[in-house]
Image (cartoon, helix red, strand yellow):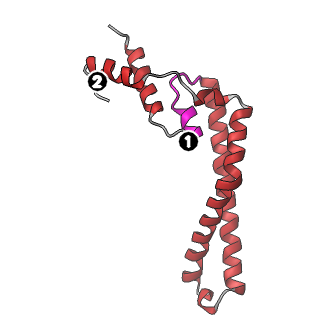
């Protein structure tokens, strides 16, 4: 009989296998052999990335609000119209900044901390699914 910890590692490995290869943070976070020290590094990097996204979103929204108020058509002089438009535009600009610059920095930070070793796992997913099915665990 296989130990429960081995079964859990197999299940975690299959969950990791289903993560898209482009989701670098999730590949590291769901890796079955992630150590506590590496998880702390990952948590710090993730929190820094979220702070960068939040600050850029807030700044873009504030700038868009100011531009719409001062240079936009008179329709945007009303606050209840201007604020949602400024928030949406701030979100779009933040998304564009994230796709062009911040994701590159995130990947670079992961590589500098040595967390890119969690991008790969020698895994025969079909064999693991069959083994778990033989134990009565459906994945």
The residue segment tinted magenta is 24-35
Quadrant occupied by the N terminus: top left
The answer to whether residue 121 is above or below residue 48 is above
Q: Residue at x 37, y 25 (%)?
A: 126
Identify the residue under disc 2. Answer: 137
Q: Is residue 29 magenta?
A: yes
Q: Position of residue 30 (x, y in %)?
A: 51, 32
Instruction: Quadrant for residue 68, please give it.
Output: bottom right
Identify the residue under disc 1. Answer: 23
- Which element type, helix, strand or loop, lies under badge 1? loop
**Which residue is the extreme one toward the bottom?**
74
Quadrant occupied by the C terminus: top left
Instruction: Quadrant for residue 94, please give it.
Output: bottom right
Q: Residue at x 47, y 22 (%)?
A: 123
Q: Residue at x 61, y 71 (%)?
A: 89
Q: Disc 1 vs disc 2: Cβ atoms closer than 8 Å?
A: no
Q: Residue at x 41, y 15 (%)?
A: 6
Instruction: Quadrant for residue 71, please give it.
Output: bottom right
> Horizontal placement of 55 versus 39: left or right?
right
Q: Position of residue 40 (x, y in %)?
A: 63, 31
- Which element type, helix, strand or loop, lies under badge 2? loop
């Amino acid at each position: 009989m296989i130990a429960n910890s081995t079964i859990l590692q197999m299940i975690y490995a299959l969950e990791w296998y289903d993560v898209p290869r482009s989701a670098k943070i999730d590949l590291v976070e769901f890796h079955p052999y992630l150590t506590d020290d590496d998880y702390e590094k990952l948590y710090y990097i993730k929190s820094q990335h979220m702070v960068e996204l939040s600050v850029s979103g807030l700044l873009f929204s504030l700038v868009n609000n100011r531009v719409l108020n001062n240079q936009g058509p008179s329709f945007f002089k009303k606050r209840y119209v201007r604020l949602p438009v400024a928030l949406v535009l701030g979100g779009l600009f933040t998304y564009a900044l994230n796709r062009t610059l911040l994701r590159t920095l995130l990947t670079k930070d992961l590589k500098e901390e040595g967390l890119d070793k969690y991008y790969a796992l020698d895994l025969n997913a079909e064999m693991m699914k069959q083994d778990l099915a033989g134990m009565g665990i459906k994945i």
